Image: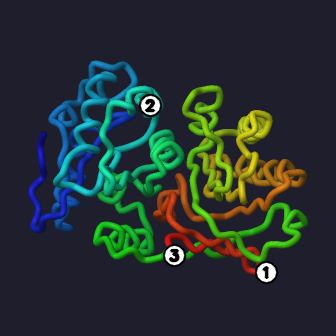
Amino acid sequence: MTQASAATNLRVMLVSPAFKLASAELTNTVKYWANKGVTLVFRDHLLRDESSDLLCSESLRVRFEELKEAFESLDSKYVWSLRGGYGSHQLLPFFKDINFKDDKIFMGFSDNTSIHYFLNMHLNKASLHAPHPNSFSKNLHSEQVLKQMDLVLDNLGEPFRFENLMFLNKSQNKSNASIRGQVVGGNLTTLVSLLGTPFNKGASNKILFIEEVEEPAYKVIRHLTHMFQAGFFDGVSALIFGHMIHSNKNQEELIKKAVHEWSLNLKLPVLWGLSAGHEHKNNRPLWFMKKTELRLDEAPCLINNI
């Protein structure tokens, strides 16, 4: 293992279950967090630009060993994924061989949704949907995102309030003024990849969060329909869409309209506009499996980690 020295004792285990990061970008990431007093601990293979795997950061064996070491370590509370992309779900069959420590907090998003989902739905453990560490060194985030990540790493346990949510099917909200529960979910395409596998457990009694990037409207609706027909939404308390972004703004508007139309016959509250996902500036940290309240009045909002 390699570690970047820092001024404090806060250590974070860095893992790469999906795509790789260029070594120069990793070096900049290390420097950024060292200046904030955070020691990033990682395996030496992350410093090499070449990989033995055509798509992912390293071979399946190396990625598993890296995760196992990080989740079983005794000297770090945080396990932070270096980036997303593709490959995290390949590791799920081997999670049975990891002794997950109770106090570990996994952080990441996008393709890392499969890891979040396993921790949340199979082990009943909390995790944090959050930006990857390299994006902070690029100055991509708003001041709010920076402050809230500092609160997380300082272990202050502050609640996060997400306002300006919009109902897509308000007529379905017939009784509840609010819903209390826990948030799970993440990237739409990654959640769909779990269907038909032993790792799918749906999201019954949960507030389901979904985000996506660069998928056209027809693929978004195809995925949502697939999830509906597979029963993934059965028992879900509410569905909240985060960033559903596309580089083509006409396509992005079509996605919103198509999801609105799709949601009208869904027998649960569906809301739009949570500030989390692939829009880096406003990709705010969102706790999974922490107590959360979704208020469904005239100004819908979600209060996370209450």
Q: Quadrant of residue 226?
A: top right
Please name the residue shown 84% across and 67% down the image. Answer: 173
* 207 left or right of 37 in image: right
Q: Nearer the viewer, residue 2 or 20?
A: 2
Q: Amino acid at mark 3?
A: Ile
The mark closer to the camera, 1 or 2, is 2
* 266 left or right of 186 in image: right
Image location (x, y in percent) of residue 31: 17, 57
Q: Amino acid at mark 2?
A: Leu
Q: Gap in Å between the C-alphas at discs 3 and 1? A: 21 Å
Do the numbered discs 3 and 2 sit on residues whose CB atoms are within 8 Å?
no
Q: Provide the residue designation for mark 1.
A: 298
Query: By what rule are the colours in the image chosen?
Result: rainbow
Image location (x, y in percent) of residue 110: 50, 45
Q: Gap in Å between the C-alphas at discs 1 and 2? A: 41 Å
Q: Quadrant of residue 54?
A: top left
* 302 left or right of 66 in image: right
Q: Nearer the viewer, residue 216 or 234?
A: 234
Say few, some or many: other residues with alpha carbon within 10 Å of mark 2 (under 14 / 14 to 19 / 20 or more). Answer: some
Instruction: Provide the secondary structure element on which disc 3 rests.
Output: loop
Which label belongs to residue 92? 2
Which label belongs to residue 306? 3
Say few, some or many: other residues with alpha carbon within 10 Å of mark 1 (under 14 / 14 to 19 / 20 or more). Answer: few
Q: Gap in Å between the C-alphas at discs 3 and 2? A: 30 Å
Please name the residue shown 82% across and 53% down the image. Answer: 257
202 over 159 or under it: above or below: above
**Sequence-first disc among 3 and 1:** 1
123 over 37 or under it: above or below: above
Do we see residue 25 in this rendering?
no
Q: Amino acid at mark 1?
A: Glu
